[in-house]
Amino acid sequence: MVSKGLPSREQALELLKQKHCSSVVISHCLAVAELALETASYLEKKGLKVDTKLVVAGALLHDLGRSKTHTVDHAIVGAEIAKESGLPEPIIRIIKRHVGGGITTAEAKAFGWPKDVYVPETLEEKIVSYSDKLINQSKRMPINDEIERLQSEGKAEAAERVRRLYKDISSLLGNEE
């Protein structure tokens, strides 16, 4: 579907539909992309170098794997679909690194995932993961809602990673908490 370059918004949405993502997932991806674009644009205005086209494409496609599973494995499944679809490596990395504020090597091993890096490293990866944590279905929510959800599920480490990611991006935005 897509070869060398980044997919346009229309191409990304078409891929989600072709892979049979639900309308709920597509609405979520659109909301994440909207917040991610706002965040990236604001950071650009503050003088940071951000690839906003990558941020939008990655945000639109971050939940591509939900076409097949709604478990944490959607990150791995989505990365594989993206690879098979000829998407560029930076999008594949956003997809596989967006969950839980990042997945540690030990967690990835416990999930049976291939050895790889599953923690957002680039600013673009962090913006998509940050934006995803602030969107519940297609509505914005306070970060504490996500942190409390993770804690109530016994995922204290993930909750702390989400908190750190939120603080990192918030401090770049100038929102000191």
Image (cartoon, rainbow, N blue to C red):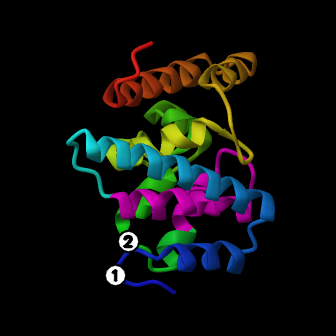
Q: Position of residue 6 (x, y in %)?
A: 39, 74
What residue appears at the point 56 percent right and 62 percent down from the top-left corner? 60
Left/right placement of residue 142 relative to residue 24 reads left
Vertical position of residue 177 compared to residue 130: above or below: above
Q: Which residues are magenta?
A: 52-80
In the rendered view, tell whether residue 65 sits above or below residue 6.
Answer: above
Q: Is residue 117 visible in the rendered structure shown here?
A: no
170 relative to 73, above or below = above
- Specify which label sits upstream in the sequence, 1 or 2: 1
Q: Position of residue 9 (x, y in %)?
A: 52, 72
Q: Taking the image as drawn, is residue 172 in sight? A: yes
Q: Position of residue 56 (x, y in %)?
A: 46, 60
Q: Are marks 1 and 2 in contact (CB under 8 Å)?
A: yes
Query: Which residue is nearer to you in this view: 136 or 148?
Result: 136
Label 1 to label 2, Cα distance in Å?
6 Å
Residue 27, image quadrant: bottom right
Disc 2 packing (10 Å; few <14; some 14–19; many ≥20): some
Q: In this view, which residue lies farthest toward the front?
A: 45
Screen quadrant of the C terminus: top left
SS label for mark 2: loop
The three-letter amino acid code for the residue at tag 2 is Pro
Amino acid at dot 1: Lys
Foreground pick, 65 / 167? 167
Residue 4 is labelled as: 1
